[in-house]
Amino acid sequence: MIPLRYFGNKVLQYVFLKYASFGIQFLATLLIAYKLGPKEFGNWSYVLIILQVFNSLNFGIPNAISNQLSINKHHEKFSEFVFKNGISLLIVNLSIISLFFFLFIHSEYFSLHSSNIGYSIFFIYFTIILFNINIFYLGILRVYGDYKLINFYQLILPVSLLVVIVFVSQTNSINWLLGGQMLGYLITTCLFLWNTPLQLGFRFSFRYVIPSLVQGLKLFLHNISHFFIPLATRFAVSTFFSLEVFGLFSFAFSMSSVVVLIMGSFSFLIHPKLLNRLSKLTPGSSQLLDSLREDYATLTNMLLHLATLFYMICIQFFVEYQDTVKLFSILCMAQALFSMEFGFSSLLMAKNRNGNLAVGTFLILSLHVILLVAAGQFTSNLMIISLSLSFSYVLLTTTYFVMCKKYILTDEQNALQYLFKDVFKIKLIIPILLTLVIDLTDFSTLFYGIPVITFFLLNRQELLNLKSRTQLILNNSSVVDL
Protein backbone atom coordinates (compact mmCIF):
# COMPACT_ATOMS: atom_id res chain seq x y z
CA MET A 1 0.00 0.00 0.00
CA ILE A 2 1.26 3.49 -0.89
CA PRO A 3 1.90 5.68 2.20
CA LEU A 4 -0.38 8.72 2.42
CA ARG A 5 2.57 11.13 2.37
CA TYR A 6 3.31 10.12 -1.22
CA PHE A 7 -0.01 11.44 -2.50
CA GLY A 8 1.32 15.00 -2.12
CA ASN A 9 4.35 14.15 -4.25
CA LYS A 10 4.06 16.08 -7.53
CA VAL A 11 6.07 13.50 -9.46
CA LEU A 12 3.81 10.68 -8.25
CA GLN A 13 0.72 12.77 -9.06
CA TYR A 14 2.02 13.50 -12.54
CA VAL A 15 2.96 9.87 -13.26
CA PHE A 16 -0.31 8.54 -11.82
CA LEU A 17 -2.39 10.93 -13.92
CA LYS A 18 -0.23 10.13 -16.94
CA TYR A 19 -0.99 6.44 -16.45
CA ALA A 20 -4.66 7.30 -15.96
CA SER A 21 -4.72 9.38 -19.14
CA PHE A 22 -3.16 6.62 -21.19
CA GLY A 23 -5.51 4.10 -19.63
CA ILE A 24 -8.40 6.29 -20.76
CA GLN A 25 -6.78 6.70 -24.18
CA PHE A 26 -6.35 2.92 -24.43
CA LEU A 27 -10.02 2.40 -23.60
CA ALA A 28 -11.10 5.16 -25.99
CA THR A 29 -9.04 3.64 -28.83
CA LEU A 30 -10.59 0.23 -28.20
CA LEU A 31 -14.10 1.70 -28.26
CA ILE A 32 -13.38 3.77 -31.37
CA ALA A 33 -12.03 0.69 -33.15
CA TYR A 34 -15.03 -1.39 -32.02
CA LYS A 35 -17.63 1.21 -32.95
CA LEU A 36 -16.13 2.26 -36.28
CA GLY A 37 -14.94 -1.13 -37.53
CA PRO A 38 -11.69 -1.73 -39.46
CA LYS A 39 -12.66 0.25 -42.61
CA GLU A 40 -13.95 3.38 -40.85
CA PHE A 41 -11.11 3.10 -38.33
CA GLY A 42 -8.80 3.28 -41.35
CA ASN A 43 -10.44 6.61 -42.28
CA TRP A 44 -9.96 7.84 -38.72
CA SER A 45 -6.31 6.73 -38.91
CA TYR A 46 -5.91 8.77 -42.10
CA VAL A 47 -7.26 11.84 -40.28
CA LEU A 48 -4.82 11.18 -37.43
CA ILE A 49 -1.92 11.05 -39.89
CA ILE A 50 -2.91 14.50 -41.23
CA LEU A 51 -3.02 15.83 -37.67
CA GLN A 52 0.33 14.29 -36.78
CA VAL A 53 2.05 15.69 -39.85
CA PHE A 54 0.86 19.27 -39.34
CA ASN A 55 1.26 19.08 -35.56
CA SER A 56 4.95 18.40 -36.14
CA LEU A 57 5.51 21.56 -38.20
CA ASN A 58 6.66 23.72 -35.29
CA PHE A 59 10.16 24.30 -36.76
CA GLY A 60 11.70 23.47 -33.39
CA ILE A 61 10.53 26.77 -31.90
CA PRO A 62 9.00 25.30 -28.68
CA ASN A 63 12.18 23.27 -28.04
CA ALA A 64 14.51 26.18 -28.75
CA ILE A 65 12.58 28.52 -26.42
CA SER A 66 12.16 26.00 -23.57
CA ASN A 67 15.86 25.04 -23.78
CA GLN A 68 16.83 28.72 -23.49
CA LEU A 69 14.52 29.16 -20.51
CA SER A 70 15.92 26.03 -18.84
CA ILE A 71 19.39 27.54 -18.93
CA ASN A 72 18.34 31.10 -17.99
CA LYS A 73 15.32 30.52 -15.75
CA HIS A 74 16.75 32.52 -12.85
CA HIS A 75 17.48 35.57 -15.04
CA GLU A 76 14.00 37.08 -14.99
CA LYS A 77 14.45 39.91 -17.50
CA PHE A 78 16.19 37.73 -20.06
CA SER A 79 13.56 35.00 -19.58
CA GLU A 80 10.79 37.49 -20.41
CA PHE A 81 12.82 38.65 -23.41
CA VAL A 82 13.08 35.03 -24.62
CA PHE A 83 9.39 34.37 -23.96
CA LYS A 84 8.11 37.44 -25.85
CA ASN A 85 10.32 36.70 -28.83
CA GLY A 86 9.05 33.13 -28.66
CA ILE A 87 5.43 34.31 -28.91
CA SER A 88 6.30 36.34 -32.01
CA LEU A 89 7.96 33.29 -33.53
CA LEU A 90 4.88 31.21 -32.65
CA ILE A 91 2.61 33.60 -34.58
CA VAL A 92 4.90 33.38 -37.61
CA ASN A 93 4.91 29.59 -37.24
CA LEU A 94 1.08 29.38 -37.17
CA SER A 95 0.90 31.52 -40.30
CA ILE A 96 3.26 29.17 -42.15
CA ILE A 97 1.28 26.11 -40.97
CA SER A 98 -1.92 27.74 -42.27
CA LEU A 99 -0.29 28.30 -45.67
CA PHE A 100 0.92 24.70 -45.89
CA PHE A 101 -2.51 23.42 -44.86
CA PHE A 102 -4.19 25.49 -47.58
CA LEU A 103 -1.80 24.05 -50.17
CA PHE A 104 -2.38 20.53 -48.87
CA ILE A 105 -6.18 20.60 -49.12
CA HIS A 106 -5.84 21.76 -52.74
CA SER A 107 -3.35 19.01 -53.62
CA GLU A 108 -4.05 15.99 -55.81
CA TYR A 109 -3.14 13.61 -52.96
CA PHE A 110 -5.81 15.11 -50.71
CA SER A 111 -8.40 14.97 -53.49
CA LEU A 112 -7.78 11.24 -53.95
CA HIS A 113 -8.10 10.42 -50.23
CA SER A 114 -10.64 12.95 -48.94
CA SER A 115 -13.88 11.39 -50.12
CA ASN A 116 -14.81 10.28 -46.60
CA ILE A 117 -13.60 13.38 -44.73
CA GLY A 118 -15.95 16.12 -45.92
CA TYR A 119 -16.43 18.97 -43.47
CA SER A 120 -13.99 17.34 -41.02
CA ILE A 121 -11.30 19.45 -42.67
CA PHE A 122 -12.42 22.55 -40.71
CA PHE A 123 -12.15 20.68 -37.41
CA ILE A 124 -8.74 19.36 -38.46
CA TYR A 125 -7.40 22.85 -39.18
CA PHE A 126 -8.48 24.44 -35.88
CA THR A 127 -7.31 21.40 -33.94
CA ILE A 128 -3.84 21.80 -35.51
CA ILE A 129 -3.65 25.51 -34.62
CA LEU A 130 -4.73 24.96 -31.01
CA PHE A 131 -2.40 21.98 -30.61
CA ASN A 132 0.65 24.03 -31.63
CA ILE A 133 -0.26 26.77 -29.14
CA ASN A 134 -0.59 24.12 -26.43
CA ILE A 135 2.79 22.55 -27.25
CA PHE A 136 4.51 25.94 -27.05
CA TYR A 137 3.04 26.59 -23.59
CA LEU A 138 3.70 23.07 -22.31
CA GLY A 139 7.42 23.66 -22.79
CA ILE A 140 7.17 26.86 -20.74
CA LEU A 141 5.11 25.27 -17.97
CA ARG A 142 7.54 22.33 -17.73
CA VAL A 143 10.46 24.67 -17.07
CA TYR A 144 8.48 26.51 -14.36
CA GLY A 145 7.13 23.30 -12.81
CA ASP A 146 3.39 24.04 -13.16
CA TYR A 147 2.34 20.39 -13.08
CA LYS A 148 -1.30 21.11 -12.21
CA LEU A 149 -2.00 22.64 -15.62
CA ILE A 150 0.11 19.97 -17.32
CA ASN A 151 -1.89 17.27 -15.52
CA PHE A 152 -5.16 18.86 -16.61
CA TYR A 153 -3.93 19.01 -20.21
CA GLN A 154 -2.99 15.35 -20.33
CA LEU A 155 -6.36 14.25 -18.88
CA ILE A 156 -8.86 16.40 -20.76
CA LEU A 157 -7.96 15.19 -24.25
CA PRO A 158 -8.43 11.41 -23.83
CA VAL A 159 -11.49 12.07 -21.65
CA SER A 160 -13.05 14.16 -24.42
CA LEU A 161 -12.51 11.33 -26.94
CA LEU A 162 -13.95 8.76 -24.55
CA VAL A 163 -17.05 10.87 -23.83
CA VAL A 164 -17.64 11.48 -27.53
CA ILE A 165 -17.33 7.85 -28.64
CA VAL A 166 -19.59 6.65 -25.81
CA PHE A 167 -22.43 9.10 -26.41
CA VAL A 168 -22.53 9.73 -30.17
CA SER A 169 -23.93 7.54 -32.92
CA GLN A 170 -21.82 6.12 -35.74
CA THR A 171 -23.15 8.79 -38.12
CA ASN A 172 -20.58 11.61 -38.47
CA SER A 173 -18.56 10.00 -35.67
CA ILE A 174 -15.24 11.31 -37.08
CA ASN A 175 -16.56 14.88 -36.99
CA TRP A 176 -17.68 14.39 -33.40
CA LEU A 177 -14.29 12.94 -32.41
CA LEU A 178 -12.47 15.89 -33.97
CA GLY A 179 -14.87 18.30 -32.30
CA GLY A 180 -14.15 16.73 -28.92
CA GLN A 181 -10.40 17.10 -29.48
CA MET A 182 -10.76 20.71 -30.60
CA LEU A 183 -12.85 21.61 -27.55
CA GLY A 184 -10.26 20.06 -25.24
CA TYR A 185 -7.43 22.04 -26.84
CA LEU A 186 -9.49 25.24 -26.69
CA ILE A 187 -10.10 24.86 -22.94
CA THR A 188 -6.41 24.19 -22.19
CA THR A 189 -5.31 27.11 -24.40
CA CYS A 190 -7.50 29.49 -22.39
CA LEU A 191 -6.15 28.13 -19.10
CA PHE A 192 -2.53 28.40 -20.28
CA LEU A 193 -2.97 32.03 -21.34
CA TRP A 194 -4.73 32.92 -18.07
CA ASN A 195 -2.04 31.29 -15.90
CA THR A 196 1.05 32.21 -17.90
CA PRO A 197 4.21 32.22 -15.68
CA LEU A 198 5.71 35.08 -17.71
CA GLN A 199 4.17 38.35 -18.82
CA LEU A 200 2.46 38.13 -22.20
CA GLY A 201 3.81 40.37 -24.93
CA PHE A 202 5.41 40.53 -28.34
CA ARG A 203 8.99 41.32 -29.23
CA PHE A 204 11.08 40.65 -32.30
CA SER A 205 14.82 41.09 -31.83
CA PHE A 206 16.76 39.95 -34.92
CA ARG A 207 19.91 39.50 -32.82
CA TYR A 208 18.10 36.89 -30.73
CA VAL A 209 15.50 35.52 -33.14
CA ILE A 210 17.84 34.55 -36.00
CA PRO A 211 20.25 32.37 -33.89
CA SER A 212 17.26 30.87 -32.05
CA LEU A 213 15.52 30.14 -35.33
CA VAL A 214 18.64 28.44 -36.70
CA GLN A 215 18.89 26.23 -33.61
CA GLY A 216 15.14 25.65 -33.77
CA LEU A 217 15.34 24.56 -37.41
CA LYS A 218 18.08 22.08 -36.55
CA LEU A 219 15.91 20.66 -33.75
CA PHE A 220 12.96 20.70 -36.11
CA LEU A 221 14.83 18.61 -38.69
CA HIS A 222 15.76 16.18 -35.92
CA ASN A 223 12.24 16.01 -34.49
CA ILE A 224 10.44 15.70 -37.80
CA SER A 225 12.91 13.07 -39.07
CA HIS A 226 12.46 11.14 -35.83
CA PHE A 227 8.69 11.52 -36.09
CA PHE A 228 8.59 10.38 -39.74
CA ILE A 229 10.40 7.09 -39.06
CA PRO A 230 7.30 5.38 -37.58
CA LEU A 231 4.99 7.51 -39.73
CA ALA A 232 6.75 6.29 -42.89
CA THR A 233 6.05 2.74 -41.73
CA ARG A 234 2.34 3.50 -41.41
CA PHE A 235 2.34 5.22 -44.79
CA ALA A 236 4.03 2.19 -46.39
CA VAL A 237 1.38 -0.13 -44.95
CA SER A 238 -1.39 2.16 -46.23
CA THR A 239 0.25 2.11 -49.68
CA PHE A 240 1.06 -1.60 -50.06
CA PHE A 241 -1.95 -3.09 -48.26
CA SER A 242 -5.74 -2.74 -48.22
CA LEU A 243 -7.58 -0.19 -46.10
CA GLU A 244 -8.75 -2.98 -43.78
CA VAL A 245 -5.18 -4.24 -43.21
CA PHE A 246 -4.07 -0.65 -42.62
CA GLY A 247 -6.83 -0.31 -40.02
CA LEU A 248 -5.59 -3.44 -38.23
CA PHE A 249 -1.98 -2.21 -38.35
CA SER A 250 -2.99 1.24 -37.10
CA PHE A 251 -4.85 -0.34 -34.20
CA ALA A 252 -1.81 -2.40 -33.15
CA PHE A 253 0.48 0.59 -33.68
CA SER A 254 -1.73 2.88 -31.58
CA MET A 255 -1.81 0.35 -28.74
CA SER A 256 1.98 -0.09 -28.72
CA SER A 257 2.46 3.69 -28.78
CA VAL A 258 0.33 4.09 -25.65
CA VAL A 259 2.78 1.90 -23.72
CA VAL A 260 5.78 3.96 -24.85
CA LEU A 261 4.10 7.30 -24.20
CA ILE A 262 3.79 6.30 -20.55
CA MET A 263 7.57 6.46 -20.30
CA GLY A 264 7.46 9.85 -21.97
CA SER A 265 6.21 11.18 -18.64
CA PHE A 266 9.56 10.37 -17.05
CA SER A 267 11.67 12.05 -19.75
CA PHE A 268 9.26 15.00 -19.88
CA LEU A 269 9.73 15.71 -16.18
CA ILE A 270 13.50 15.51 -16.03
CA HIS A 271 14.39 17.05 -19.41
CA PRO A 272 15.12 20.63 -18.19
CA LYS A 273 17.34 19.40 -15.36
CA LEU A 274 18.92 16.69 -17.51
CA LEU A 275 19.82 19.26 -20.16
CA ASN A 276 21.40 21.48 -17.52
CA ARG A 277 23.47 18.64 -15.97
CA LEU A 278 24.58 17.10 -19.27
CA SER A 279 25.93 20.44 -20.48
CA LYS A 280 28.65 20.00 -17.81
CA LEU A 281 29.40 16.33 -18.61
CA THR A 282 33.05 15.40 -19.17
CA PRO A 283 34.57 12.09 -20.41
CA GLY A 284 34.71 9.44 -17.70
CA SER A 285 32.07 11.14 -15.51
CA SER A 286 28.91 9.69 -17.06
CA GLN A 287 27.61 7.92 -13.95
CA LEU A 288 24.40 10.01 -13.87
CA LEU A 289 23.72 9.40 -17.55
CA ASP A 290 24.45 5.68 -17.22
CA SER A 291 22.10 5.33 -14.23
CA LEU A 292 19.26 7.19 -15.96
CA ARG A 293 19.72 5.15 -19.13
CA GLU A 294 19.67 1.89 -17.21
CA ASP A 295 16.51 2.81 -15.30
CA TYR A 296 14.69 4.07 -18.38
CA ALA A 297 15.54 1.09 -20.59
CA THR A 298 14.81 -1.46 -17.85
CA LEU A 299 11.42 0.00 -16.96
CA THR A 300 10.42 0.51 -20.61
CA ASN A 301 11.35 -3.05 -21.57
CA MET A 302 9.49 -4.46 -18.56
CA LEU A 303 6.32 -2.55 -19.43
CA LEU A 304 6.48 -3.58 -23.09
CA HIS A 305 6.93 -7.28 -22.31
CA LEU A 306 4.07 -7.20 -19.81
CA ALA A 307 1.93 -5.22 -22.26
CA THR A 308 2.24 -8.04 -24.80
CA LEU A 309 0.73 -10.49 -22.31
CA PHE A 310 -1.98 -8.01 -21.32
CA TYR A 311 -2.83 -7.28 -24.96
CA MET A 312 -3.02 -11.00 -25.75
CA ILE A 313 -5.72 -11.40 -23.07
CA CYS A 314 -7.70 -8.21 -23.73
CA ILE A 315 -7.85 -8.65 -27.50
CA GLN A 316 -9.94 -11.82 -27.09
CA PHE A 317 -12.95 -9.54 -26.49
CA PHE A 318 -12.47 -7.88 -29.90
CA VAL A 319 -12.92 -10.59 -32.51
CA GLU A 320 -12.03 -8.43 -35.53
CA TYR A 321 -8.62 -7.56 -34.07
CA GLN A 322 -7.54 -10.94 -32.62
CA ASP A 323 -4.98 -11.50 -35.40
CA THR A 324 -2.99 -8.43 -34.35
CA VAL A 325 -1.28 -9.94 -31.28
CA LYS A 326 2.03 -10.75 -32.98
CA LEU A 327 1.90 -7.48 -34.89
CA PHE A 328 1.47 -5.61 -31.61
CA SER A 329 4.36 -7.56 -30.10
CA ILE A 330 6.81 -6.87 -32.93
CA LEU A 331 5.99 -3.14 -32.76
CA CYS A 332 6.56 -3.21 -28.99
CA MET A 333 9.97 -4.81 -29.47
CA ALA A 334 10.93 -1.99 -31.85
CA GLN A 335 10.12 0.48 -29.07
CA ALA A 336 12.05 -1.66 -26.57
CA LEU A 337 15.15 -1.45 -28.76
CA PHE A 338 14.78 2.30 -29.17
CA SER A 339 14.51 2.82 -25.40
CA MET A 340 18.25 2.10 -25.31
CA GLU A 341 18.83 5.47 -27.02
CA PHE A 342 17.62 7.43 -23.98
CA GLY A 343 19.92 10.27 -22.95
CA PHE A 344 22.09 10.40 -26.06
CA SER A 345 19.97 12.91 -27.98
CA SER A 346 19.66 15.07 -24.85
CA LEU A 347 23.44 15.03 -24.46
CA LEU A 348 23.90 16.26 -28.03
CA MET A 349 21.37 19.06 -27.39
CA ALA A 350 23.15 20.01 -24.17
CA LYS A 351 26.47 20.20 -26.00
CA ASN A 352 24.87 22.36 -28.74
CA ARG A 353 25.35 19.68 -31.38
CA ASN A 354 21.84 20.07 -32.77
CA GLY A 355 23.16 20.05 -36.33
CA ASN A 356 24.88 16.66 -35.89
CA LEU A 357 21.75 15.32 -34.23
CA ALA A 358 19.55 16.50 -37.11
CA VAL A 359 21.79 15.11 -39.85
CA GLY A 360 22.13 11.73 -38.13
CA THR A 361 18.37 11.35 -37.66
CA PHE A 362 17.65 12.45 -41.23
CA LEU A 363 20.11 9.90 -42.65
CA ILE A 364 18.48 7.06 -40.72
CA LEU A 365 15.05 8.23 -41.89
CA SER A 366 16.26 8.13 -45.50
CA LEU A 367 17.63 4.62 -45.01
CA HIS A 368 14.37 3.54 -43.37
CA VAL A 369 12.35 4.78 -46.35
CA ILE A 370 14.62 2.81 -48.71
CA LEU A 371 14.10 -0.31 -46.58
CA LEU A 372 10.33 0.15 -46.64
CA VAL A 373 10.22 0.61 -50.42
CA ALA A 374 12.40 -2.48 -50.93
CA ALA A 375 10.30 -4.52 -48.50
CA GLY A 376 7.09 -3.42 -50.21
CA GLN A 377 8.44 -4.42 -53.61
CA PHE A 378 9.84 -7.82 -52.66
CA THR A 379 7.48 -9.10 -49.98
CA SER A 380 3.83 -8.93 -49.02
CA ASN A 381 4.58 -9.97 -45.43
CA LEU A 382 3.31 -7.29 -43.03
CA MET A 383 5.55 -8.62 -40.24
CA ILE A 384 8.72 -8.10 -42.28
CA ILE A 385 7.75 -4.51 -43.05
CA SER A 386 7.05 -3.96 -39.36
CA LEU A 387 10.44 -5.49 -38.47
CA SER A 388 12.20 -2.78 -40.49
CA LEU A 389 11.29 -0.35 -37.70
CA SER A 390 13.40 -2.35 -35.22
CA PHE A 391 16.36 -2.36 -37.59
CA SER A 392 16.18 1.39 -38.14
CA TYR A 393 15.91 2.10 -34.41
CA VAL A 394 19.04 0.03 -33.74
CA LEU A 395 20.91 2.03 -36.38
CA LEU A 396 19.61 5.31 -34.95
CA THR A 397 20.73 4.45 -31.42
CA THR A 398 24.15 3.40 -32.70
CA THR A 399 24.48 6.65 -34.68
CA TYR A 400 23.65 8.76 -31.61
CA PHE A 401 26.16 6.83 -29.52
CA VAL A 402 28.95 7.36 -32.07
CA MET A 403 28.26 11.11 -31.92
CA CYS A 404 28.22 11.09 -28.10
CA LYS A 405 31.19 8.85 -27.34
CA LYS A 406 33.73 11.71 -27.18
CA TYR A 407 31.69 13.28 -24.35
CA ILE A 408 31.27 9.99 -22.46
CA LEU A 409 34.38 7.85 -22.91
CA THR A 410 37.99 8.50 -21.97
CA ASP A 411 40.84 7.59 -24.32
CA GLU A 412 41.35 4.35 -22.38
CA GLN A 413 37.74 3.13 -22.77
CA ASN A 414 36.76 0.92 -25.70
CA ALA A 415 33.77 2.25 -27.67
CA LEU A 416 32.73 -1.14 -29.07
CA GLN A 417 32.81 -2.73 -25.63
CA TYR A 418 30.70 0.12 -24.20
CA LEU A 419 28.22 -0.24 -27.09
CA PHE A 420 27.44 -3.88 -26.29
CA LYS A 421 27.85 -3.64 -22.51
CA ASP A 422 26.09 -0.36 -21.70
CA VAL A 423 24.00 0.55 -24.77
CA PHE A 424 22.62 -2.72 -26.16
CA LYS A 425 22.72 -4.66 -22.92
CA ILE A 426 22.64 -8.41 -23.44
CA LYS A 427 20.24 -8.75 -20.48
CA LEU A 428 17.68 -6.71 -22.43
CA ILE A 429 18.51 -8.05 -25.90
CA ILE A 430 17.94 -11.75 -25.05
CA PRO A 431 14.23 -11.34 -24.07
CA ILE A 432 13.68 -9.15 -27.14
CA LEU A 433 15.19 -11.77 -29.46
CA LEU A 434 13.08 -14.52 -27.86
CA THR A 435 9.97 -12.42 -28.44
CA LEU A 436 10.89 -11.76 -32.09
CA VAL A 437 11.37 -15.48 -32.68
CA ILE A 438 7.81 -16.07 -31.46
CA ASP A 439 6.55 -13.14 -33.58
CA LEU A 440 8.10 -14.38 -36.82
CA THR A 441 7.37 -18.10 -36.47
CA ASP A 442 4.32 -20.30 -35.92
CA PHE A 443 4.85 -20.52 -32.16
CA SER A 444 1.68 -19.94 -30.15
CA THR A 445 1.27 -16.56 -28.49
CA LEU A 446 1.10 -18.45 -25.19
CA PHE A 447 4.90 -18.68 -25.41
CA TYR A 448 5.19 -14.94 -24.73
CA GLY A 449 5.47 -15.88 -21.06
CA ILE A 450 8.98 -17.24 -21.71
CA PRO A 451 10.66 -13.91 -22.62
CA VAL A 452 8.82 -12.22 -19.75
CA ILE A 453 10.18 -14.72 -17.22
CA THR A 454 13.63 -14.47 -18.83
CA PHE A 455 13.56 -10.69 -18.51
CA PHE A 456 12.83 -10.79 -14.78
CA LEU A 457 15.48 -13.45 -14.14
CA LEU A 458 18.22 -11.60 -16.03
CA ASN A 459 17.43 -8.11 -14.71
CA ARG A 460 16.92 -8.71 -10.99
CA GLN A 461 19.72 -6.35 -9.93
CA GLU A 462 18.66 -3.64 -12.37
CA LEU A 463 15.09 -3.82 -11.04
CA LEU A 464 16.39 -3.48 -7.46
CA ASN A 465 18.43 -0.42 -8.50
CA LEU A 466 15.35 1.01 -10.18
CA LYS A 467 13.32 0.46 -7.02
CA SER A 468 15.84 2.29 -4.81
CA ARG A 469 16.08 5.29 -7.14
CA THR A 470 12.31 5.43 -7.45
CA GLN A 471 12.12 5.50 -3.66
CA LEU A 472 14.48 8.50 -3.64
CA ILE A 473 12.19 10.45 -5.96
CA LEU A 474 9.12 9.51 -3.94
CA ASN A 475 10.73 10.80 -0.76
CA ASN A 476 11.94 14.02 -2.38
CA SER A 477 10.19 15.10 -5.57
CA SER A 478 12.32 18.26 -5.80
CA VAL A 479 15.16 16.20 -7.29
CA VAL A 480 13.51 16.65 -10.72
CA ASP A 481 13.29 20.45 -10.40
CA LEU A 482 15.65 22.75 -12.26
Image (cartoon, helix red, strand yellow):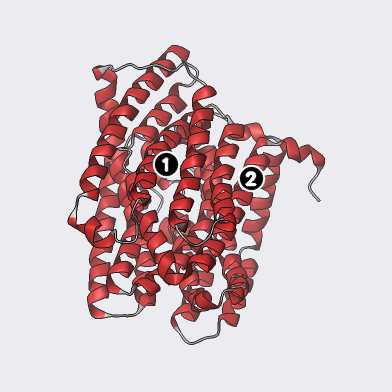
Q: Is residue 196 visible?
A: no
Q: Which residue is mark 1?
A: 346
Secondary structure state at the residue bearing disc 1? helix
**From the viewer's perspective, is the residue at label 1 or at label 2 nearer?**
2
Q: Is residue 166 visible?
A: yes
How far is mark 1 from mark 2, CA to CA? 25 Å
Residue 245 sits above or below residue 192 on the image:
below
Closer-to-camera residue (206/343): 206
How many numbered discs?
Answer: 2
The C terminus: image quadrant: top right
Q: Which residue is mark 2?
A: 17
Mark nearer the N terminus (1 vs 2) = 2
272 sits left or right of 92 in the view: right
Residue 250 occupies which quadrant of the picture?
bottom left
Q: Position of residue 255 (x, y in %)?
A: 51, 62
Closer-to-camera residue (180/451): 180
320 sits left or right of 352 in the view: right
- The structure residue drawn at horizontal position 62% and vertical position 41%, both measured from the top left corner, is 14
Give the residue type at disc 1.
Answer: Ser
